[in-house]
Each structure stands twice: as C-alpha cells, then as structure tokens.
Image (cartoon, rainbow, N blue to C red):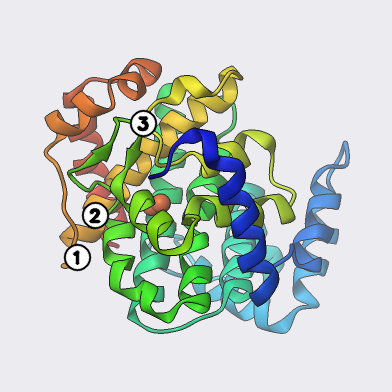
C-alpha cells in the first residue's frame, strides 16, 4: 500500500521505468522562449521569430489561436499577430502544451482522454488561481497541464495500463487510502511499484519546472496538503486537487467512465483544500457551472 514514507521508492522505480522508455526532455523551442521571457525586457519579435522558424509548431499554434476557445474577433494568419492578440502568456501556454503533447507521443482513445483532461485541468487550475488570488496563474496552468503526464508514459511502458486510465483520469474515486491517497495510486503501486504522480514528477523536473509545480504534481493525489511546508506549494497543491476534481467531472460529462462524488462528499474529504482556498461547496458548484460552459467549446 502506498504512503508518503515510500515516496522515495516510488521515485526510484519511476526512474527505472522512464530510463527504459526515454524521459521526454524540455524541447529547444521551449528553452529558447524561456530564455527570452526571463530577460528583464523580453523581446516579443525575437519570440515570434523563434516560433516562426518551426513550421510545424507555427501551423499548430495558428490552428489553436483561431479556435473558438480564444474567441478572437479576427482570423489570425501570422505568428506575430497571434502573439499580439493572444498575449505572451496564452501564446507561451499553447507552445508548452503543444510541445508536451509532441514529446509524450502516443495515440488512441486513452491518450485523447488524457489530453482533454490535462487541458481542462490546466484551464480550470488557472481560473481557480485567479479566483483565490494565487501568486502565479501561469504556475497553476502549468501544474494542471503536466499533473497527469505520467499516464501516457505508463501506457507506453505497460499497454494494459489503458484498463485503468479512465479510473486514473476520473480522479475522484470513492475510496481513499487512510485518508491520504486516492485509490488509483494504490492500484498503480500494486501493479508497478510506483505511480503516475512519481513519473510525472520526473518529467516536470526534466522540463525544469518550479519546485512548487514539481511537488504539487508528485502529491496531486494526497488529500493531506499539510505535508507541504512551503506556503506557495501548499496553495498550489490545493488548487491542483480542486482543478483535478472538476477536470474529472467534466470528463465524466463527456461520457467517459469515471466515478464522481457529489460536491459535499468531495468537500468533506478535502476540508484542508477548502480551508486553504477559503472556498465553500457553493463556490465549487458555481465554478463547475461556469467552467463547463467555457470548456465545452
Ligand atoms: Fe492524477
Ligand atoms: Fe488528473
């Protein structure tokens, strides 16, 4: 049975797994954009040049920029225009999500479900971050985007993982282990001596994501957020737990097989998350309604 004490063992085993299949590392385009963004004054024309040089990435970016999700009033046909209209943050998030998708690879319905859940959780996570005044909306988005990236890697290594993918992405299984873990982690531990959180943690580290993000990913099925001593990490972990729940609910709405607890039951089991974010059950219900409409697009 999994518990926090053997997290090191889980990471060790996760390392073995990813070394066998190759850990997706941060691509050059993301590294180059990061370098530019981190300068005291980011040069936007340099950023659009970096992206324009990558024809496949440019095509994908324009397709996403023109999707109903962003609701742009005009059709965008150049990278410079996309950057101007979307803003640097949205632009960067699209590059990050597209790069991660390419690097993780895989195909089939389980992978598609994984992506809808990851993209939904990223968006929900950034909305919650905004609502609760979290210091970095971007970090919340990135945590949501990467949180389950261990799932496609487990599918790659163990094709029979698809049997439990729905359960993993449903997120809110009714059982919990000692009030610390949701049961998917226990199932994964029994089968593989590790879990998708530990594998996702390694990917996040290889992409040089922040400590708050990597730790939130590693513990995104732990309801006891008090294990985080750093205040930012604790709040991000709480945001991710709630976003993951709502992300699972939306997947459920799209017809996937997953179990969803009513808000009240979820809230009872996640009292620490509710307290940390100062949210009520009604707040969660309202948020779910708003986000359902936005994400269905
Ligand atoms: Fe997960
Ligand atoms: Fe998830």
The answer to which of marks 3 and 1 sits earlier in the sequence is 3
Q: Quadrant of residue 225?
A: top left
- Of pointers 3 and 2, the one earlier in the residue sequence: 3
Q: CA distance from mark 3 to mark 2?
A: 20 Å
Q: Quadrant of residue 128?
A: top left
Residue at the spot 22% in from the left edge and 48% down from the top edge: 173
Residue 252 image point, x, y percent: 19, 59
Residue at the spot 59% in from the left edge and 55% down from the top edge: 93
Q: Is residue 55 above or below residue 67?
A: below
Quadrant for the C terminus in the image: bottom left
Closer to the camera in the image, 76 or 247: 247
Identify residue for label 2.
250
Q: Which residue is mark 3?
A: 223
Which residue was labeled with disc 1?
254
Q: CA distance from mark 3 to mark 1?
A: 26 Å
Q: Is residue 177 above or below residue 66?
A: above
Contact, mark 1 vs mark 2 (Cβ under 8 Å):
yes
């Amino acid at each position: 049975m999994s518990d926090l004490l053997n997290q090191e063992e889980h990471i060790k085993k996760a390392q073995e797994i990813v070394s066998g299949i190759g850990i997706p590392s941060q691509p050059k385009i993301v590294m180059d954009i990061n370098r530019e963004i981190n300068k005291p004054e980011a040069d936007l024309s340099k950023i659009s040049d970096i992206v324009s040089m990558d024809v496949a990435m440019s095509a994908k970016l324009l397709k996403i920029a023109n999707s109903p999700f962003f609701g742009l009033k005009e059709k965008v046909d150049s990278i410079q225009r996309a950057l101007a209209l979307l803003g640097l943050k949205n632009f960067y998030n699209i590059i990050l999500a597209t790069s991660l998708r390419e690097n993780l690879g895989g195909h089939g319905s389980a992978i598609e479900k994984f992506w809808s859940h990851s993209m939904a959780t990223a968006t929900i996570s950034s909305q919650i971050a905004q609502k609760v005044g979290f210091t970095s909306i971007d970090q919340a988005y990135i945590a949501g985007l990467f949180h389950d990236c261990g799932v496609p890697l487990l599918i790659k290594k163990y094709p029979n993982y698809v049997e439990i993918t729905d359960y993993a992405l449903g997120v809110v299984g009714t059982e919990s282990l000692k009030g610390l873990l949701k049961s998917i982690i226990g199932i994964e531990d029994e089968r593989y001596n590790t879990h998708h959180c530990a594998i996702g943690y390694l990917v996040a580290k290889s992409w040089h994501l922040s400590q708050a993000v990597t730790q939130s990913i590693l513990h995104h099925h732990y309801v006891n957020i008090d294990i985080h001593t750093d205040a930012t990490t604790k709040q991000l972990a709480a945001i991710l737990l709630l976003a993951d729940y709502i992300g699972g609910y939306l997947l459920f709405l799209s017809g996937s097989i997953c179990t969803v607890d009513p808000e009240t039951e979820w809230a009872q089991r996640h009292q620490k998350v509710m307290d940390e974010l100062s949210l009520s059950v009604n707040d969660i219900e309202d948020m779910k309604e708003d986000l359902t409409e936005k994400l269905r697009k």
